Image (spheres, helix red, strand yellow):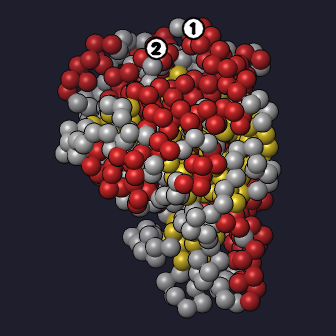
Amino acid sequence: MLVLVSLVTRRLRDQFIRKTRRVKAVQEQFLLELLRVQETTEVGQVLGLSKIQTVDQFREQVPIWPYSQYNPYLQRVANGEHNIVTPDPLIGLNVTSGTTGDRKFIVVTKRSQRLINRTNQVAMGFALTLARQQKRPLGQLLVTTAVISTGVTQGGIPYGHVSSSGLRLSDRIYRYVFSQPYDALKISNPVARHYVCLLFAMNKRHTGLIGATFPVLVLRLCDYLDRFRDRLLDDLAAGTIPTDLSIEPDLRQTLERLIRPQPRRAAELRQILKDTGTLTPRQIWPDLAFVITAKGGTSNFYFQRFADHFGDLPIFGGTYASAEATFGVHWHFESEGAILAIDNGFFEFIPADQWQVEQPKTLLATEVKVGEFYRILITNYAGFYRYDLGDVVEVIGFYEQAPLIVFRYRQGGTLSATTEKTTEYHATRALQAAQRDHGVQLKDFCITLSEQITFAYYVINVEVSADSPLEDPQAFLDQCDRYLQLENASYGEKRTSGEIGEPRLRLLAPGSFTILYARQIKPGMTDAQLKFPHISGDRSFMDGIEVEQEIVL
């Protein structure tokens, strides 16, 4: 099955590479075919899509819309009305996590899902080709993402988060390469789901891949492994699933029929634990080829902790995607850039000097420049036209004619004591650099604003790993401040002038971010959708969290 998957994905990768050599033609063909399919919908008629024959016409005639413009139409879709944003029958709705506002519905059809599946397969084709070139063995995939639907709309349409629906609606062939039973991913309780997936995977010595939506979830998997390792070894030897785990009764029966006692494997792992004092993923699965998780944004902050669990194992970014669209395909272990997904959507780019313009001038994929930041617009089969998601990307190069893009931050998610607009990208780079300089490992961090509003200052809240103490908090705070000034010139100017006060460092009690993560998971939201904010203008964000020490400059 792995050989078959490898052959299919490498063929799709080769087809995609050929398309990157004629980006303009591929993008134009995608757009015009989409307009002909969608022109009879209600939104298509409002926008006059039937009259559009060229790319330039499309850009002149169709306005740039945020989600609020689409919301009334998508609410009608959720209520069961047809041919509103797409003529195709719906197979479900994706729903966003709501971390940057109210949740949003996004239509999913067989056509749109087929394109998403193809792009995912292209990415896997790049990864498997790299693994073969580097003589990395291929093995089964360990994932712990839930595949359950969140609910059903008033119109009877099932909806769920994209990470869940993506796995649920992916080609069934891929279920055969999981190192845990597919039914284990139906467990709704996250602790029980992680435990059961680890239990089954620990018997699969030749597991070769570990996948998670975000890097923090990979680290959470490692934390579960460390926390439950003794119980896991006992259950592995006995072939049992603990009765105190919260598992739906029908799923428990199915999984208990599948599990078998593995005393030899348990003894092998116990010996590793006895000899080394640790039981890391790399020790359990020596054939691991790479980890698949998101790159860009705040990911690099978490990657600094990967070495403890995975050594020098490569990290592959998969795809750069959201609930609304797939934007890019990762192509190399060493690069954080993703190739623009030119056959999955029609893309435009808003230059930084146009961000304050209501209907800005845009650039096409072949017109962007390396080193520049852009807001990216998407037109796709989810019924969006020139949709402004707010994602800010940096172009870091080109793959043939296609730009290599990196997600940097979501516009609107900024921190301002006055008007400096510090982004998550600024904050993450600053804390990452200070962490590196001081040889310390942070569990996580979040920068908030002081309680005092006039001459406000930044409060840098951190939880330090137990095995990596912060020897000089004063110097660490000073470095954080210096790096923030370097990353965000506006912050630097206002710090120098005294408009923004001196920052403070708060060392939080162990387990603080576990509490904060739990607060962020809203009703109906899965743990895989957690996008923890590393900056927050909400002055009550850290309420109730124990501060062990506060340091001032």
Q: Kindly identify the residue that appears in the image at 70 percent across and 90 percent down.
A: 498
* Residue at disc 2, secondary structure: helix
Q: Kindly identify the residue that appears in the image at 76 percent across and 48 percent down.
A: 367
- With respect to residue 29, does 370 lie above or below? below
- With respect to residue 357, does 450 lie above or below? below
Residue 227 badge: none
Along the line of sight, the residue nearer the viewer: 297 or 136 = 297
Residue 421 x %, y %: 62, 73
Residue 334 x %, y %: 76, 36
**Quadrant into which the C terminus falls:** bottom right
Along the line of sight, the residue nearer the viewer: 384 or 427 = 384
Q: Kindly identify the residue that appears in the image at 44 percent across and 28 percent down.
A: 111
Disc 2 marks which amino acid?
Ile
* Residue at disc 1, secondary structure: helix
Residue 282 x %, y %: 63, 27
Instruction: State the residue position of label 1.
Output: 4
Query: From the viewer's perspective, is 377 left or right of 185?
Result: right
Disc 1 marks which amino acid?
Leu
Q: Kindly identify the residue that appears in the image at 78 percent across and 36 percent down.
A: 401
Using the rendered image of the protein, determine whether residue 541 is visible from the camera's viewpoint: yes
What is the CA distance from the residue labelled 2 to the residue labelled 1?
Answer: 9 Å
Instruction: State the residue position of label 2.
Output: 173
Along the line of sight, the residue nearer the viewer: 11 or 90 = 90
Residue 317 x %, y %: 63, 36
CB under 8 Å between discs 2 and 1: yes
